[in-house]
Image (cartoon, rainbow, N blue to C red):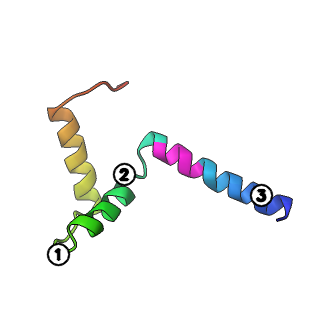
Amino acid sequence: MSPWERLARGAQSLRRGIRGVLGADAYEKYLEFHAAHHPDHEPLSEAEFWRDRTDRQDRNPQGRCC
């Protein structure tokens, strides 16, 4: 593997890690879970998912920085 390939892999890994920490990958994880557990139902759209998630957090606040 060339140094450039190693660098590209490292950058991809770092990106995945940051997205995971920030929660930016939550919709992708939701789609994976939904496909595995509810294949007979239509998943929420991305906008519906984020709205629902925000509403749930507002109704049930837990330890967050903001």
Q: Is residue 63 left or right of residue 24?
A: left
**Residues tagged 3 and 1 counted as in contact (Cβ below 8 A):** no
As drawn, which residue projects farthest toward the front? Answer: 37
Q: Amino acid at mark 3?
A: Arg
Q: Residue at x 37, y 57 (%)?
A: 29
Q: Residue at x 55, y 46 (%)?
A: 17
3D distance between C-alphas at marks 2 and 1: 21 Å
* Tag 3 secondary structure: helix
Nearest to N terminus: mark 3 or mark 1: 3
3D distance between C-alphas at marks 2 and 3: 27 Å
User: Measured along the vertical axis of the image, is residue 64 above or below residue 41?
Assistant: above
Q: Is residue 41 left or right of residue 62?
A: left
Compare residues 41 and 51 and report the one nearer the observer.
41
Nearest to N terminus: mark 2 or mark 3: 3
Identify residue for label 3: 6
Query: Is 41 in the magenta?
Result: no
3D distance between C-alphas at marks 3 and 1: 41 Å
Q: Which residues are magenta?
A: 15-20
Identify residue for label 2: 26
Q: Give residue 57's mark.
A: none
Mark 2 closeness class: few <14, some 14–19, many ≥20 residues within 10 Å: some
Nearest to N terminus: mark 2 or mark 1: 2
* Tag 2 secondary structure: helix
The C terminus, quarter of image: top left
Q: Residue at x 22, y 49 (%)?
A: 51
Identify residue for label 1: 40
Q: Amino acid at mark 1?
A: Asp
Q: Position of residue 21 (x, y in %)?
A: 47, 40
Q: Position of residue 59 (x, y in %)?
A: 14, 34
